[in-house]
């Protein structure tokens, strides 16, 4: 177990959404390795069970963030399995890379329903559980630098992430009196199993060269920001958006 007095999450109960792969899986492992009691949540039950078996999480619950009934059931089940929730990592998300003129109403709705509405559903349900238990807590929303700047063929994703930044700030303002901190991480390009082949290609390498650090991030590059916001080290932080992008956001035009 990795411990640090400043970034201590030992014994904290953390619910991580979208934990079956990619950033969510990394977030679950990061917290579990540091002693948190992690409840991994996603739709792919087989992936979650494997994560639990190899110690990446203590428990697994089925979750579809687009379904309000599923959200309520997952939050309730997580508390039954692990105890009152202390941390939510609001990570579940999808993207659609169609050109804006080709986006259908269904495409738009699917991305917004997962990335924005789903994050709101989870935050509200977890905050209600924290308030009912009279416990302070930390909600960490996973936004994106595309919520702060633009790229082609990602209209719905960028719109959802921009809105999530504002949701983060609004909820931080409302819930501070309950001792609930709400912050966001805005990652830049990060290698996951879904994009690994692209970033190994010539266009992917060219994209990496446009990042000031001249590289694409790895999921573990987000661990420091996660631990800062989830632990007591960030006790005086709420409504903050922590950008982790190798300098991409401040790149020159």
Image (tube, rainbow, N blue to C red):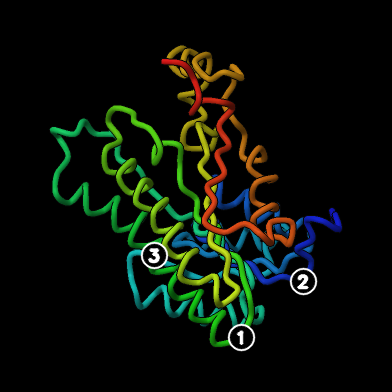
Q: Which residue is mark 1?
A: 134
Crowding near pointer 2: few (<14 within 10 Å), some, many (20+)?
some
| Distance in Å between CA atoms under marks 1 and 2 | 17 Å
Q: Which residue is mark 3?
A: 120
Quarter of the picture holding the C terminus:
top left
Q: Are marks 1 and 3 in contact (CB under 8 Å)?
A: no
Above/below status of 80 relative to 17: below
Residue shown at 70% from the left, 57% from the top: 31
Crowding near pointer 3: few (<14 within 10 Å), some, many (20+)?
many
Q: Nearer the viewer, mark 2 or mark 3?
A: 3
Residue shown at 46% from the left, 12% from the top: 202
Residue shown at 44% from the left, 68% from the top: 122
Looking at the image, residue 199 sits to the left or right of residue 28; the answer is left
Above/below status of 177 relative to 113: below
| Distance in Å between CA atoms under marks 2 and 3 | 26 Å
Instruction: Specify the quadrant of the image occupied by residue 43.
Output: bottom left
Nearest to the observer: residue 143 or residue 113: 143
Looking at the image, residue 109 sits to the left or right of residue 52; the answer is left
Helix, strand or loop status at disc 3: helix
């Amino acid at each position: 177990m990795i411990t640090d007095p400043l970034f201590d999450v030992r014994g904290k109960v953390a619910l991580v959404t979208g934990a079956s792969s990619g950033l969510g899986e990394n977030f679950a492992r990061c917290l579990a390795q540091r002693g948190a009691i992690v409840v991994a949540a996603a739709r792919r039950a087989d992936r979650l069970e494997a994560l639990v078996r190899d110690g990446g999480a203590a428990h697994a619950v089925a979750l579809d963030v687009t379904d309000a009934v599923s959200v309520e059931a997952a939050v309730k089940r997580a508390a039954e399995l692990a105890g009152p929730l202390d941390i939510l990592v609001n990570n579940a998300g999808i993207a659609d890379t169609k050109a804006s003129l080709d986006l259908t109403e269904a495409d738009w709705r699917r991305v917004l329903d997962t990335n924005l509405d789903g994050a709101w559903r989870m935050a509200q349900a977890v905050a209600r559980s924290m308030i009912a238990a009279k416990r302070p807590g930390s909600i960490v929303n996973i936004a994106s630098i595309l919520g702060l700047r633009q790229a082609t063929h990602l209209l719905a994703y960028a719109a959802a992430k921009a809105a999530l930044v504002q949701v983060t700030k609004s909820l931080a303002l409302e819930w501070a009196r309950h001792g609930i901190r709400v912050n966001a991480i805005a990652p830049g390009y990060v290698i996951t199993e879904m994009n690994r082949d692209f970033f190994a290609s010539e266009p992917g390498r060219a994209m990496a060269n446009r990042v000031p650090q001249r590289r694409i991030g790895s999921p573990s590059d987000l661990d420091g920001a996660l631990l800062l916001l989830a632990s007591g080290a960030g006790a005086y932080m709420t409504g903050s958006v922590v950008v982790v992008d190798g300098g991409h956001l401040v790149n020159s035009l």
